[in-house]
Amino acid sequence: MAWYKPSDRPLPWKAIQDPYHIWLSEIILQQTRVEQGMNYYLRFVEAYPRIQDLAAAPDDEVMKLWEGLGYYSRARNLLAAARYVANELNGVFPESYEGILALKGVGPYTAAAIASFAFNLPHAVLDGNVFRVLARFFGISTPQDSTQGKKQFAQLAESLLEQEAPGLYNQAIMDFGATVCLPRNPKCQQCLMADQCIAFNEKRIAELPVKSKKIVKTTRFFHYLILNHQGLVFIQKREEKDIWQDLYQFPLLETESLEMEWPDLHQKIQTNWMGLKLSIPRAGTQVFQQLLTHQIVNVRFWELELSAIESNLPNNWVSIPREELGLYAFPRVIDRYLKDDTLYLNLV
């Protein structure tokens, strides 16, 4: 706390006690770097200055504002929690740790951060920065993602908490991890506690903290069909419980490979949607790829003209003018395609 100077790392959600703004920043910063999340936070605060404003916003509008941040379940939880506070709690944000923890999308870390920053309640924050500082300083080799590790780190964090100023202490140790005790190339020569740090003195900095779980990624192959008909293009909302739920996309065929020529693709289209009469497309695009936490998604786009529609289309297909594509929230891989001027899809 003697080291901590708020002015060294000014952020708009620091030194305020508005629980709504603090909650908003914490949800945005879940699995997102501060540098990326900053502009999203500022846009959300401008668009929805009060939690009632967010609660009243249309789902598609919020998802569009969230576009590009990833982990879209956070946006859905954000809306659900805002509507709960606005409608069930008369717009009053919960003021207890238990009440905050009950909000959708809020876990122990986020609840502790909001409780300590907004209400100065004595709850220790345990994010990636704090895990790293504690693991190195105390030389803890227990995997932080194990049941035993989570319990050990939680008990240690609570025992170290400055009870009289929990918010200040939590912010200090988080900032220390973010600016000094870095994941790579930590600034040990600038660390006031280096002489007491076990990892530094035992040359174990690169080893700590320890994680036991290795993420196994699955690979998927998507063919997106850009179906043009009488000046309109078809899109659909992803409604199944899968990646990108509630985002929009072009009609999709998922296959076991991207190596597919037009006759094979056309046969699959006819199997899925018999009523579509299609022109022969130009070749599919180059492969676009999006890396997710547990998946690698490989995508090709096919530009197609519909000469006729001979039967009913799926209920969730929507035809819109091309120039309105920018109004809808798409996965990042589709966004990249739409913004690629080297391709043949020209938007007004």
Image (cartoon, rainbow, N blue to C red):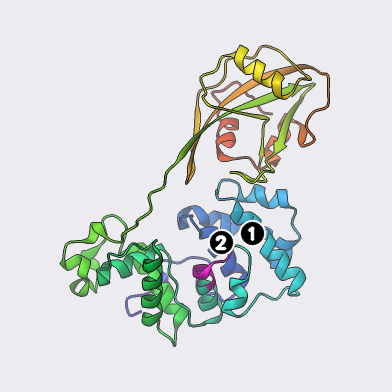
**Is 205 within the magenta?**
no
Residue drawn at x 48%, y 55% is 31
Seen in the image, is 231 located left or right of residue 298? Answer: right
**Is 107 within the magenta?**
yes
- For the C terminus, give its image quadrant: top right
Q: Position of residue 14 (x, y in %)?
A: 50, 71
Q: In the image, what residue type sits under mark 2?
A: Ile
Front-most of residues 174 and 300? 300
| Principal secondary structure, stretch drawn in magenta | helix
Q: Position of residue 113 (x, y in %)?
A: 50, 72
Start and end of the magenta stretch? 106-111
Q: Is residue 81 above or below residue 228?
A: below
User: What secondary structure is marked by label 1?
Assistant: helix
Query: Quick one: label 1 or label 2, which is nearer the N terminus?
Result: 2
> What residue does disc 1 label?
77
Q: Residues within 10 Å of mark 2 (few under 14, many from 20)?
A: some
Residue drawn at x 52%, y 55% is 37
- State the image quarter where residue 166 is shown: bottom left
Farthest-out residue, left: 202
Q: Is residue 344 above or below residue 133?
A: above
> What residue does disc 2 label?
27
